[in-house]
Image: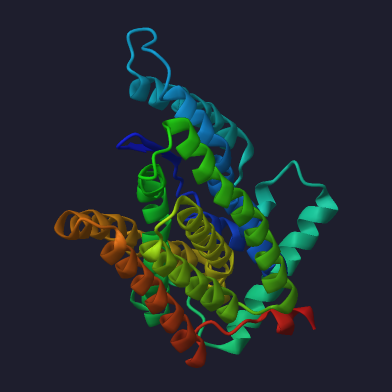
């Protein structure tokens, strides 16, 4: 989704929320983070491609009676509308309904997922009921973790262009510079998710990127040059993007069935409040102080909380992986 603010242009997309649930339906645990990473790579890729395009559109003269910002929304809505019909036709609810899979592939996948579900049941602490998932402390903890990453993601989407443009860049130049960190973030996201799947480890694969993003926001608050701000935003992009896939691989470690649907929806709903609180606090604190610094430190603090809660959750056994058990 495009965001245009004060002449700054960025592409911001929150396409990560349902992928945790669908990944649990379609991919074994060993491949789940990487699958989620490839899906979520759409967000930084859209920023890298869409920011310069949006910047160019914003410099067009009025066409068909539409102002530049109106034309931007119309042109960028068309692909989403068309792809919506493709999803309705091609995406099925589960592998058992996927006629486009070979019978042997479909049977293997169904058996593998059932084997993992049985391993989770044997391990204990497993939640499959919708109402139980809504009150599960682990779900609430993951929502708090997601709150911090959402605060960071939406801060990038809404405020990064303005932070870059304050150094005197045009709308097109701002879009171009805003897209560079996203390209690096895609590579980091996929590589980090691949490592998480290979090792079967989730906790530190969430903690380390959150700490990295936290440090990036602190650096951005102290930035006084265009080079420094772009470098800080690159660090933030890499951190937030890398944390997403391992984070969304966690719910399926202890949730399934209706519990997975309800639990992931709860994590999404509560966690996405960070997408409002983070950018809003930056706007309010900038109005009060005349600087981005205090607001960026606030968002950095939410990511520090995400890292701490992830560690605490792991120590209580809330996200203990069953990957190794199933593979052996």
Q: Nearer the viewer, residue 70 or 62?
A: 62
Residue 290 horizontal/vertical position (percent)? 20, 55
Relative to 131, say whether 5 is above or below. Answer: above
Q: Nearer the viewer, residue 234 or 73?
A: 234
- Furthest-left residue in this view: 288
Residue 156 horizontal/vertical position (percent)? 42, 53
Residue 324 in view here: yes
The residue located at (49%, 45%) in the rendering is: 178
* Colour convention of the picture: rainbow
Relative to 311, say whether 216 is above or below. Answer: above
- Furthest-right residue in this view: 104
Q: Is residue 162 left or right of residue 181?
A: left
Give the quadrant of residue 292. bottom left
Q: Quadrant of the N terminus?
A: top left
Relative to 272, say whether 167 is above or below. Answer: above
The residue located at (53%, 63%) in the rendering is: 235
Instruction: Give the mark count.
Output: 0
The residue located at (68%, 74%) in the rendering is: 116
The residue located at (80%, 83%) in the rendering is: 328
- Furthest-top residue in this view: 64
Give the quadrant of residue 136. bottom left
Residue 313 horizontal/vertical position (percent)? 46, 85
Q: Nearer the viewer, residue 216 or 229?
A: 229
Q: Nearer the viewer, residue 301 or 87?
A: 301
Q: Is residue 107 left or right of residue 235?
A: right
Residue 32 in view here: no
Residue 15 horizontal/vertical position (percent)? 49, 49
């Amino acid at each position: 989704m495009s965001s245009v603010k004060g002449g700054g242009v960025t592409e911001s997309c929150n396409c990560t929320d349902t992928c945790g649930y669908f990944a649990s339906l379609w991919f074994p645990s060993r491949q789940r983070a990487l699958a989620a990473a490839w899906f979520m790579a759409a967000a930084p890729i859209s920023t890298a491609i869409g920011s310069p395009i949006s910047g160019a559109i914003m410099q067009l003269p009025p066409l068909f009676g539409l102002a530049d910002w109106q034309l931007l929304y119309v042109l960028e809505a068309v692909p989403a509308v068309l792809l919506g019909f493709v999803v309705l036709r091609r995406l099925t609810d589960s592998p058992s309904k996927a006629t486009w899979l070979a019978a042997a592939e479909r049977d293997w996948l169904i058996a593998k997922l059932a084997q993992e579900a049985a391993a989770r049941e044997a391990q204990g602490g497993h939640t499959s009921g919708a109402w139980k998932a809504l009150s599960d402390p682990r779900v609430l903890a993951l929502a708090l973790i997601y709150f911090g990453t959402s605060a960071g993601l939406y801060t990038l989407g809404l405020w990064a262009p303005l932070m870059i443009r304050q150094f005197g860049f045009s709308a097109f130049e701002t879009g171009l510079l805003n897209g560079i960190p996203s390209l690096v973030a895609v590579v980091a996201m996929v590589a980090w998710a691949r490592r998480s799947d290979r090792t079967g480890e989730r906790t530190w694969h969430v903690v380390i990127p959150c700490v990295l993003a936290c440090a990036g926001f602190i650096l951005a608050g102290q930035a006084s040059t265009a080079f420094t701000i772009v470098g800080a935003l690159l660090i933030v992009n890499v951190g937030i993007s890398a944390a997403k896939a391992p984070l969304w691989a966690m719910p399926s470690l202890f949730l399934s069935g209706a519990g997975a649907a309800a639990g992931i929806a709860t994590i999404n709903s509560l966690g996405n409040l960070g997408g409002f609180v983070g950018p809003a606090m930056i706007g309010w604190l900038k109005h009060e102080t005349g600087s981005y610094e205090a607001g960026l430190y606030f968002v950095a603090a939410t990511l520090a909380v995400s890292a701490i809660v992830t560690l605490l959750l792991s120590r209580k056994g809330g996200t203990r992986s069953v990957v190794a058990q199933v593979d052996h």
